[in-house]
Amino acid sequence: MTDATASAQPARVFSLARIEGALPWIALGLVGLLLPLLDDSYIGVIAQRAYIYWILSAGLNLVVGYAGQIAIGWVSMLTLGAYATASLTAGNATPPWHPYLALVAGGALGAVFGVVVGLPALRLRTFYFAMTTLGFATIVTQVALAWKSVTGGGVGTPGPVFPWPFEPGWGFYYFCFFLAALATWMTANIASSRFGRALVAIRDAEVAAEASGIAKPRLLVAVFLFAGALGGVAGGLFSSLQSYITPDAFTFEMSVLFFIAILIGGRGSILGPALGTIILTALPEFAAPLVQWSTFLYAALLLVIVLVIPGGIADLLDYRNRRPLEQHREIVARPELLSRVLDKRSERNAIALTGVSLHFGGVRAIDGLDLEIRSGEVHGLIGPNGSGKTTTLNVISGYYRPNAGQLKLNGADLPFDRPQARAGYRIARTFQTPRLVGGASVLENVMIGGMVDGSGSFAESMLSLPRHHRDEKRLKEAALLALATVGLEQLAPVRADRLQHSELRFMEIARALMLRPAFLLLDEPAAGLSAEEIRRLGALIKAISREGTGVLLVEHHADLIFDICDRVTVLNLGKTLAAGTPDEIRSHREVVSAYLGA
Ligand code: ADP
Ligand code: MG
């Protein structure tokens, strides 16, 4: 970004934050590297178990903590990886494999079944999905019991012994340590990429995620694949640590441990769940008489954390967001920056609705509506509550399929039922109730809006390759510029749930601007704003349209509508009551008597 005034301060704040963020990891890494100096093999085994559990939890964290999918039975990936690695190495069914190769196979098997188990999440609601993962864990254990020739059934099978350089003892310790570090690095890369932000958006603001063009199925499949692979690798290591595995080594308590470690760590954090896993692994060891009570302990710990610090360990560590914010903040939009945010559009575009009707059961939400939104104009849509304004906006942005009528963009049909495809047409929107990711920073919330403009793949982000960095740099610059435009750049590093309502409305506009929209649909953007803020909002919306964007403005504030709209449509009970220029509407007899007062 070239505008120093808009970028200098947040940029400095962020690089400082990065150094602060690295400190706990450096400390953990040092402890891990130096632990063998203690030469205490008991502590070594506990640490190995913690690393192995974390390798699984690191991937599961993306599924549970980031994407918000309740995958309780993820222990099944550990079971699969353990049996695959152990029985391939032992040569139970095939000629014996090299242990390292068998470990890779364990990871691959985990990846495949991660997707198989994950697929129902695309269709099922949360609790049903939780049950399918549990059910799968039970099936895997039953198969392990029954398939005696491969798994040894109830008698079990020996775990692999990894040869040099990771031979049993401290060699294996460092193997687990480095793989845990690698898993941490990869998940942290994903978490801080546009894919990580998209996962959290799916969790906390699914409709906003769709409107930003985030394709939930593709993204979730990638995450399940990754989490399954890590679970499988963890299983292979686990079978070696156990030296002998039987089906009852893979208990329900273990699955609960992984899940609860993430919850007490804090959703949307990497460090928190890592600490949670270490604590939960070590806890029963240091309180030996309590081992039988471990499930109870976990549950009690979870209850305490949920009640006392709902955000988990991560929240405790997030001291930066406890610093007070300035009390009297003003939102001073800077429309003059818009020319750099938006592509100047000279071509004339239009979205046209003809004869659109949509019924919800007996309610005719819209009933034969004609409407045209043209580029470079602000089209006001007004009417009493329940007159179909939001429904109209939802039809245009692809949430509803109307019962009748046509929707065209520049004469070509716009597909119905495809909200996540709208971003590709550069149609952006805001929501009547702001949809935000409360636990993410304002900057991250705005960056979500630019999802479709990234060019790097999931794998490139995971491995922190150049295209990922280019994407991040570009998205961050664009988001800071969008925030400066709406007047919120000072709040960029602040958690979004600390903002005032009016600030959230402007934040949503900044997110929508990330699409460089050809069309912008605003659902009551002035609701809850002060008179001065409404005036500034009006100037901003007007300026957006003057850059060539077509704006649909749903509003209740008559002054705002008549000040900035080029054309106005008045709805009543889903039908057009009047349409025309602001002057025509202002003098329309029925409209005046019904809404505007004498
Ligand atoms: P407005 O935004 O103008 O206040 P809406 O478009 O939200 O109005 O609603 C129009 C009508 O459709 C209302 O009667 C509302 O109750 C009904 N409606 C809107 N969405 C749904 C839905 N998903 N299911 C059933 N009825 C709905
Ligand atoms: Mg509405």
Image (cartoon, grey):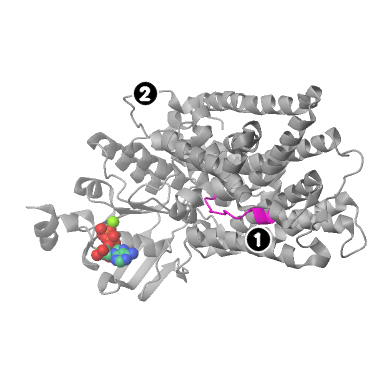
Mark 2 packing: few (<14 Cα in 10 Å), some, or many (20+)? few
Q: Earlier in the sequence, mark 2 or mark 1?
A: 1
Which amino acid, by three-letter code, is at mark 2? Glu
The quadrant of the rendering that contains the N terminus is top right
Which amino acid, by three-letter code, is at mark 1? Val
Residue 24 in the image: state x and y as whole percent: 63, 26
Q: Secondary structure at mark 2?
A: loop
Q: Secondary structure at mark 1?
A: helix
Q: Main secondary structure of the magenta part?
A: loop
Q: Which residue is mark 1?
A: 115
Above/below status of 25 relative to 200: above
Mark pair 2, 1: CA separation? 46 Å
Quadrant position of residue 592: bottom left
Q: Nearer the viewer, residue 193 or 177?
A: 177
Q: Which residues are magenta?
A: 67-77
Residue 318 in the image: state x and y as whole percent: 51, 29
Question: Can residue 597 be seen from the camera position used here?
Answer: yes
Residue drawn at (77%, 37%) of the image: 178
Residue 73 within the segment the image draws in magenta: yes
Question: Can residue 270 be seen from the camera position used here?
Answer: no
**Left or right relative to 210: residue 356:** left
**Left or right relative to 507: residue 366:** left
**Left or right relative to 217: residue 348:** left
Q: Which residue is mark 2?
A: 326
Quadrant position of residue 588: bottom left
Mark 1 packing: few (<14 Cα in 10 Å), some, or many (20+)? many
Above/below status of 132 relative to 82: below
Q: Nearer the viewer, residue 171 or 289?
A: 289
Q: Which quadrant of the picture is home to ligand 1?
A: bottom left
Farthest bottom residue in view: 404
